[in-house]
Image: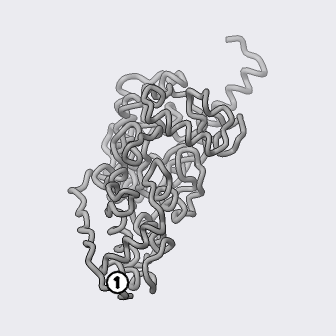
Amino acid sequence: MKWTPLTALFTLCALALAAAAQEMELGPLPAGPAAPNLARVELGELLFFDKRLGGDATISCADCHDPDRAWTDGLALSKGYPGSLYFRNTPSLANVANRKWLYWDGRLPGNDLPTMVRDHLSEAHFMQADGRLLIERMRQVPEYERRFRDASGGEPSYGRILDAVSAFVTTLVSTDVPFDRYLRGEENALDESATRGLALFRGKARCANCHNGPMLTSESFVALGTPTNADIFATPERHITFRRFTKTLGVSAYASLREDPGRESVTQNDKDRGGFRVPSLWEVGRTAPYMHDGGLATLADVVGFYDAKWDLGLAPDEKNDLMAFLDSLSSPAPPPYARPKVPDYQLRKLGEN
């Protein structure tokens, strides 16, 4: 290569990026919110697993955010409300209270969990529930009446339902994560392969350029150009959902789109086309498949995609080391979650408060 001032500038920039990545802060994992209202959290847990929060009382929050799958569903593309299919991958709720943005397109800020819960309950392709109906369902369950009074000082209301579910969701924090333990001083928490993978993550593989900070994300939106999951447009139910969603957000060319506009659908700025939220990597080893449309099935697929996309030149053993490090970002698979028993309906006497 001929050495010119321009190539010198590119080289200096590349070296600066590499040096910055080496020094980039990685974690440790933030703690959950302090001193939650325990009564509200316990009520929110019951509601999270209660199918009566779905429009037709057949779907709960936990059907798409399964605790035994690190609070996701393990599907490439989520199912949505019964009779419909969705066109994006279900993100994990682990550590969601510490995120800056919610959803793949960042259409809600991370500090507004009650609105996220409301969106999930009321959105036609999520749970399609009418808040007024949910209040009446809660009022036919004496235990819920009692729990709402204990948690919030009053009878069931839509706002109190949202607050309770949000309170529970803030408690979903990863624990006993090897890399988190390593960052907190436990030097033996990573084995040799994962330690070499950490060096690659910060250096040659350039992962830390976007996956950094306590949440292992730059909190930005990036257009990677991953191949579109063909199932979105090959399956009529998904394509219908996609069209309705993009039309509702005001995307003018919604009828002819054959790829997800991502962040552009929120900002209406074509510079954001195909941009999606850089996800947190905590729990990445337990939340396959990957990317906004679940198009990459395994961590090996993800590493292979980045290696080819950016011409990283990773050798097979380096890929294995990098995957070992990525696996260290997840909590050990816990015993099956002790799902709460949701309370039953009971007859109420006419005129009873």
Q: Disc 1 residue type?
A: Arg
State the residue in front, 213 or 70: 70
- Horizontal and vertical percent for residue 11? 67, 26
- Horizontal and vertical percent for residue 104? 53, 45
State the residue in front, 57 or 180: 57
Image point 34% across, 55% down: which residue?
59
Image side of residue 327 versus residue 100, left or right: left
Q: Quadrant of residue 257?
A: top right
Is residue 31 something one can see in this rendering? Answer: yes
Image point 40% across, 76% down: which residue?
40
Is residue 29 something one can see in this rendering? Answer: no
| Above or below 198: residue 61 | below
| Above or below 75: residue 353 | below
- Horizontal and vertical percent for residue 310? 55, 25
Residue at far right of view: 5
- Horizontal and vertical percent for residue 261? 60, 35
Image point 43% across, 35% down: which residue?
237
Circle 1 SS class: helix
State the residue in front, 178 or 121: 121
Residue at far left of view: 335
For label 1, count other residues whose C-alpha is less than 10 Å away and answer few (under 14), some (14-19) or many (20+).
some
- Please identify the quadrant where the C terminus is shown: bottom left
The total of numbered circles placed on residues is 1
Image side of residue 7 versus residue 26, left or right: right
The image's colour scheme reads: one colour
Quickly name the residue at label 1.
Answer: 146
Image point 43% across, 72% down: which residue?
135
- Please identify the quadrant where the N terminus is shown: top right
Image side of residue 217 versus residue 133, left or right: right
Residue at far top of view: 2
